[in-house]
Amino acid sequence: MIRSILAAAPIALLAATAAIAEPVNYTFDKTHTVVRASWDHQGYATMSMEFTDYDGTLALDFDDPSNSTVDVTFNIEGGFWVGANQDRFIGHLNSADLFNTEEHPTARFVATGFETEDGVTGTMTGDLTLLGNTGPVSLDVTLNRTGETSDGNAKHGFTATGMIMRSEWGLGYAVPFVSDEIDLFISTELVAE
């Protein structure tokens, strides 16, 4: 469910900016970042959860994306939000039926490639490891805006969307009554260190 989550940051590689001689380290502005997974619940409603506990290495080279490194780890146990008064549901998400956080408390996304024709939109691919299973994830990315912080650091805003089949990572509980397809949405602001 994550992925992709988690990988919104490498979208910075798609930005049309001045050439940078070597990779620059970036951090998530977590007060302005949303990592969301959503799914159909038996045709009645679209449900969603947000992943809130993550960190990683974001070394981005705008001149040569192949020099970039994106490696994001998510703390799954206690690291998501599904709404108020949802303790029972959160307990089920942590159980062996789903994320099995006792044995697999984290998930990890490592970017493997970037493609763009216009420097503003493109595709980012990577490997997501969840529940001990690793599989490919592809995200459509858009550069929303490039600027700088009040203290002069470079800042980039991106949106990424994609879809995974949760059963491919061992999260097949209640499929097909609850959709196998998980829609991913990431909106992030990255700030140069």
Image: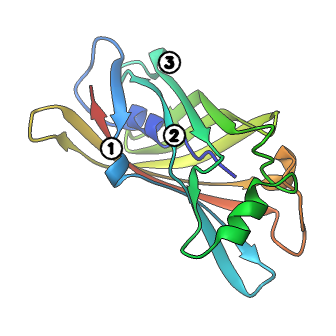
Instruction: Please tell me which residue is depicted at 37% across the width and 21% down the height of the picture.
Output: 61
Q: Earlier in the sequence, mark 3 or mark 1?
A: 1
Please state which of residues 63 and 59 is positioned toward the viewer in this rendering.
59
The answer for how far apart the CA atoms under marks 3 and 1 are is 24 Å
Check disc 1 and report the residue beneath it. 29
Which residue ends up furthest to the bottom in the rendered image? 44
Is residue 155 left or right of 69 when viewed as pictured?
A: left
Q: Amino acid at mark 2?
A: Tyr
User: Quick one: label 1, few (<14), some, or many (20+) residues within 10 Å?
Assistant: some
Q: Are marks 2 and 3 in contact (CB under 8 Å)?
A: no
Instruction: Please tell me which residue is depicted at 54% across the width and 74% down the height of the picture.
Output: 84
Please state which of residues 131 and 143 is positioned toward the viewer in this rendering.
131
- Locate residue 36, reporting x and y percent: 55, 59
Instruction: Please tell me which residue is depicted at 58% across the width and 47% down the height of the picture.
Output: 5
Q: Amino acid at mark 3?
A: Ser
Compared to residue 25, the image places residue 166 above or below, namely below
Instruction: Please tell me which residue is depicted at 37% across the width and 44% down the height of the picture.
Output: 120
Check disc 3 and report the residue beneath it. 66
Check disc 2 and report the residue beneath it. 54
Of the numbered discs in the image, which one, if any, rests on residue 64? none
Compared to residue 142, the image places residue 47 above or below, namely below
User: Quick one: label 2, few (<14), some, or many (20+) residues within 10 Å?
Assistant: some
Q: Secondary structure at mark 3?
A: helix
Q: Earlier in the sequence, mark 2 or mark 3?
A: 2
Q: Secondary structure at mark 2?
A: strand
Compared to residue 54, the image places residue 85 above or below, namely below
Is residue 42 left or right of 125 when viewed as pictured?
A: right
Picture quarter containing residue 46? bottom right
The answer for how far apart the CA atoms under marks 2 and 3 are is 24 Å
Q: Amino acid at mark 1?
A: Asp
- Locate residue 29, reporting x and y percent: 33, 43
Please state which of residues 57 and 99 is positioned toward the viewer in this rendering.
99
